[in-house]
Image: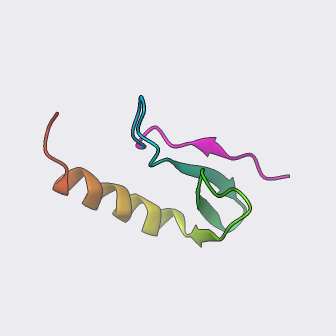
């Protein structure tokens, strides 16, 4: 069974833009929390780390 959790990098409060993540045997799973039966994306841990680095680089300090 895959255990999905809301990403700590998702919006908070009333923001509906939520990403869920899961640890998979082959890497990291990503899906839209508003559509849990919809498509899922699986990436390697290296790709996920690169994605997070890029998001952090492009996101202005709050």
* Camera-side residue of 32 and 48: 32
Residue pushed farthest left? 60
Left or right: 8 as drawn, with respect to 36:
left
Q: Residue 38 placed where, x, y %?
A: 68, 67
Residue 39 appears in which quarter of the rendering?
bottom right
Query: Which residue sits at x=47%, y=44%?
Result: 16
Colour mode of the rendering: rainbow
Q: Please tell me whether residue 2 belongs to the stretch shown in magenta.
A: yes
Question: Which image quadrant for residue 41?
Answer: bottom right
**Residue 49 at x, y percent in the picture:** 40, 59
The magenta stretch spans residue 42: no
Question: Considering depth in this image, is 38 or 60 the residue closer to the camera?
Answer: 38
Q: Is residue 62 above or below residue 25?
A: above
Q: Main secondary structure of the magenta part?
A: loop
Q: Which residues are magenta?
A: 1-9
Number of numbered markers: 0
Q: Position of residue 5 (x, y in %)?
A: 63, 41
Classify residue 12 as left or right of residue 19.
Answer: left
Query: Could you tell me which quadrant the C terminus lies in?
Result: top left
Q: Residue furthest top?
A: 13
Residue in the foreground of this view, choosing between 35 and 46: 35
């Amino acid at each position: 069974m895959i255990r999905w959790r809301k990403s700590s990098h998702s919006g908070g409060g009333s923001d509906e833009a939520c990403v869920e993540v899961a640890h998979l045997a082959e890497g990291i799973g990503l899906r839209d929390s508003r559509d849990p039966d919809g498509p899922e994306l699986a990436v390697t841990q290296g790709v996920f780390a690169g994605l997070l680095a890029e998001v952090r680089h492009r996101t202005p300090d709050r």
